[in-house]
Amino acid sequence: MAQKLYRIQNFLGLNQAIDEGSLDAAYSPDCANIDTSCGRLETAKGYTKAIAALIPGRDNFLSLYVGEIGTAMCYIAITRKYIYSYDMTNISWSTLYTFTAPLVQNRVDYINATCDGEDCLLIATGETQLLKCTGTACTAFGSEELGSNHLCNYVAMYQNRLFSGGESTAPTRLCYSQPCTLAGGIENWSESTESSELSGGYIDIGPTESDPICGIKALRNQLLIFKEKSLYRLIGDRPSNFTVERLCDLNSRVAHTAFVARGDGGFFMARDGLYVYNGVNAYRSNDADHIKKILGTVNTADCRAACTSNKLVFKLDGPLLRDYCVEYDINRGCYMLRTGFMADAFCEYKGEVYMINSNRYIYLYDNSDTYDGVPIEAYWKTPCTDLGDKGEIKGLVELYIRGESNTGSSICVETYSDGKQELYTVDGLDSPQVVKDVRLNGEGRTFAVRVSNLNGGHFSICAGLELLLSCRRRVN
């Protein structure tokens, strides 16, 4: 009877692109809440409160802003009825603005800007005039006289002008203001008496009878225009050389909150997976199918995205009112499913991701060993494999791992031989310098191993894992 050593050198991420029997051992067909950075297998980080104060009200959040307005640090939460702002002096939330009628659409956009020499956050809802928010007050933007009292839904600052789109009465129209350096600034969308180069105006993007604008995003040297079925870009720095180029078709509507800029390009999540924009072309990522089973069960129409230095996080609407988050490691091209919590919106500030949900707190994401005190259930299942020899019976003898876990916590190891399960509790995973031997039972022509935490404990397995097998030929 021969012995074999099945070795997994390192861990990458979730991969649903092909049958698990053909997967590289570094991938998992089924895993959640695991951090594989540096090749380890580790319980992923959770989140903790960024602000201790509870946000009043009951309605769900549409958008979150964390950042500076001028020199003041601001936290702003937007619902269908209210805009809330955190008062840093009184350490409490206040209602900054009340909408005349509750918002019907689930789409809010915003951009930092300067109006009349005052820094503000411009908020677009598509159902009201643009709003200027200073953090302590919220007023209407623009006027009929200046041609800027539009009910636009999407806003961006590009080449010192405010661009907007998404009006229900002109769904394919992209409007732009006069330069911010002129009197009236970005609130003036009218023609200039001095020069057409200084005028405000508009451009109809693509066919006007269909394919409405559903998002605009400014990059360093261009403005991306998402339409329901296509993607365009605008280049140039003044009306005389504004050029609109059609980039590609889109298989589904892309939520304006599903795009994250990175350098001169960015990423966005669509119904058929992750897309990359390299500054010239948009294309479906080569590893988009790694989460194809997840994408088959979720809705990306209200996808929310944020980005840290090397990680993307996407919130997706799952079945039965469940939310899923998918993380993507940009440098390594790895996905991970995050479960166990709800998310209404994300935003990024200085490389940190902030989150808001129905608990009515703002959280700092990826910053704790729990979900604000709630244990994280983490697991990793290896591909079910026959090692390329379907006639060989593999007896599971011993598992070798090294790593560490929280004091007093254990990990669970499950083995599957021809689908038959064996369960083991592993204590004493104390040091990455010490190898832990786990005696196993069971045999079959296929096998898989599942590692998980118990009671939300934190664990870290380094240098892969090894499984000793006792192998023999099948005898009729």
Image (cartoon, grey):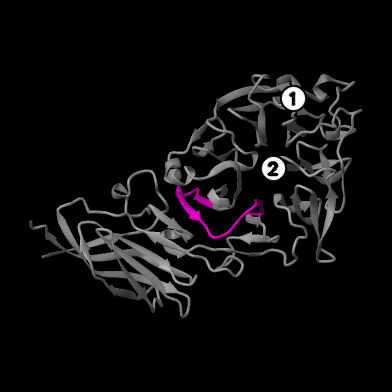
Q: Nearer the viewer, mark 1 or mark 2?
A: 2
Magenta residue check for 73: no
- Which residue has dot 2 on it? 106
Helix, strand or loop at disc 1? loop
Q: Residue 326 lies in magenta, yes or no?
A: yes
Residue 3: % across, % down? 16, 65
Label 1 to label 2: alpha-carbon separation: 19 Å
Disc 2 element: loop
Question: Mark 1: which amino acid?
Answer: Ala
Of 443 and 76, which appears nearest the observer?
443
Which stretch appears magenta? 325-351
Q: Residue at x 47, y 60 (%)?
A: 35
Give residue 414's position: percent from left, percent from top: 34, 66
Neighbours of disc 2 within 10 Å: few (<14), some (14-19), many (20+): some
The residue nearer to you, when weighing 40 against 13, is 13
Kindly indicate the quadrant of the structure image that contains residue 57: bottom right
Labelled disc at residue 170: 1
Give the amino acid at mark 2: Asn
How many numbered circles are shown?
Answer: 2
